[in-house]
Image (cartoon, helix red, strand yellow):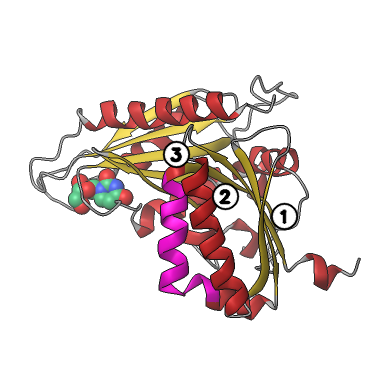
Amino acid sequence: MAVSDRTRLSVLIADVHAGREAEFLALARQLDDLLNRNKYARADTIGDEALPSRFYAVRQWTSAEAARRSHSNPEANALSVQLSEIALINHVVNGVRQGNRGRTEPDRRARADRDRRAGFERRAGDVGRPTGNRRIGRERRLGPRRARERTADLIGAARRARENAAAPFSNFKVGAALETSDGTIITGCNVENSTYGLSVCAEQVAMVKALSDGHRAFTRIAIVADSEAPAAPCGACRQILWEFGGNLEIRLANLAGEQGTHRLEDLLPLPFDGHLL
Ligand code: THU
């Protein structure tokens, strides 16, 4: 297959929350119709024969440009948000954006390995990285139930960390929970300062704590705030998370529950990083 064809293929795995399969499929079909109708892609959602809660969303984009146009289609975005509320969604092939590392790896293992390598290995200096070939305890692929529980754990940890926020000036408490590739969860909350400018965000606290404990590879971060719309990480946090965590999965939640899942590469397109130095 020519590389140009491969780079326009997206495949997502959706592990649907128990009992919401019919709802998921109806929404997924609506999204597929929209993508097909607008000629953004040939899109289809296919169920896993062995696992009723698992679906594959396969999209062969008409062009990279068409894929980008679909990403700024509000109707498509609204459907994607609804889908992410009832399923744990992961890209297994993301061939739309070219010129970036690792967009076309064919499976989750490859992506997990890439994420594991992310962070310090992407930097020229690579100072302070633990030596040796650390075995990662969580490499085993998780079933959907365990994956959901782990997400709930991560969001729960962020929610609890939020309670510790020192935010007397904004009264906007934020909690974050960062998962390392060996499954350790490290939390952070925002800590404000009377000089305002010295305040630090929850995500940065979590990342600095993790680095200082010797962790160097990360998979996901959950961020919880008491806001109606999901509180996405600020620009500075995106840069710091990218620097040390690479293409993390970002799970956003408010006190009512989860509000969406993103990949950091989507929140921070065209990032500045050590490769440019
Ligand atoms: N805040 C975070 O902790 N994370 C973000 O990504 C956005 C903002 C904090 C900083 C400040 O203490 C409060 O929220 C209001 O901006």
Residue 211 position within the rendered picture, expressed as x and y whole percent measured from the top left: 48, 32
Vertical order, 148 against 272 (above or below): above
Label 1 is placed on what type of residue?
Gly
- Residue where numbered disc 1 is placed: 102
Q: What are the residue bounds of the magenta stretch?
A: 70-85
Label 2 is placed on what type of residue?
Asn
Quadrant for the C terminus in the image: bottom right
Quadrant for the N terminus in the image: bottom right
Vertical order, 37 against 83 (above or below): below
Residue 235 occupies quadrant = bottom left
Marks 2 & 1, CB-CB < 8 Å contact: yes
Vertical order, 134 against 246 (above or below): above
Label 3 is placed on what type of residue?
Ile
Residue furthest toward the right? Answer: 1
Q: In the image, is 121 to the left or to the right of 252?
A: right
- Judging depth in this view, the residue of 50 and 264 nearest the camera is 50
Vertical order, 7 against 259 (above or below): below
Give how far apart the Cα atoms at labels 2 and 3 are.
Answer: 11 Å
Q: Would residue 198 be seen by someone viewing this image from the given angle?
A: no
- Residue at point 44% right, 34% down? 178
Queried whether the magenta region covers residue 77, the answer comes back as: yes
- Residue at point 16% right, 35% down? 166
Q: In the image, is 33 to the left or to the right of 133?
A: left
Queried whether the magenta region covers residue 29, the answer comes back as: no
Dominant secondary-structure state across the stretch colored magenta = helix
Residue 131 position within the rendered picture, expressed as x and y whole percent measured from the top left: 70, 26
